Image (tube, helix red, strand yellow):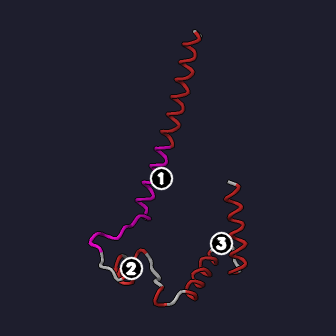
Amino acid sequence: MHFGFAMNNLWDERSIHRYGVGVRSSEYYVAHNEHIRNVVPRERLLEFEAKEGWEPLCAFLGRDVPREEYPHRNDSKAANLLIMSFLVNGVGIWIAVAVGGWGLVWGARRLLGI
């Protein structure tokens, strides 16, 4: 945990030095994108939003558009399924820990004749 905070602080220092803003701000996002626009040649840069689908991406890469639908993983349905899986797995783990603990206590009591 401490390592993560240290890395965030180092990253913040570097971004403040380069862009004048910290990484934990929307200004950093804007400044970084502007920096990329300035250093990457226009013919090699694709500004793409996933909601645009396959067409602009495939055209930029010189590839045929796939037949399957463009994947949309960052939607509310997928997010809700992920949260539900975390809840189910989390509860399942605690139930397993509780049952295992109860089993150990029950077994120890039987073994010791308590």
* Quarter-of-image position of residue 21: bottom right
Real-space Cα separation, disc 2 to disc 1, in angstroms: 30 Å
* Label 3 Cα crowd, 10 Å radius (few <14 / some 14-19 / many 20+): many
Residue 59, placed above or below residue 25: below
* Quarter-of-image position of residue 35: bottom right
- Outermost residue toward the bottom? 42
Residue 97, placed above or below residue 102: below
Q: Residue at x 60, y 80 (%)?
A: 32
Return the residue at label 1. 83
Q: Residue at x 68, y 65 (%)?
A: 8
Return the residue at label 2. 57
* Label 1 Cα crowd, 10 Å radius (few <14 / some 14-19 / many 20+): few
- Counting from the top left corner in percent of width and height, residue 6 is at 71, 61
| Comparing labels 2 and 1, the label whose residue is closer to the camera | 2
- Counting from the top left corner in percent of width and height, residue 90 is at 51, 43
- Which badge, 3 or 1, is on the more N-terminal residue? 3
Real-space Cα separation, disc 3 to disc 1, in angstroms: 27 Å
Q: Disc 2 residue type?
A: Leu
- Which badge, 2 or 1, is on the more N-terminal residue? 2
Return the residue at label 3. 23
Q: Is residue 9 magenta?
A: no
Q: Disc 1 residue type?
A: Ile
Q: Residue at x 58, y 85 (%)?
A: 34
Q: Decide if residue 87 is on the left or right side of residue 67.
A: right
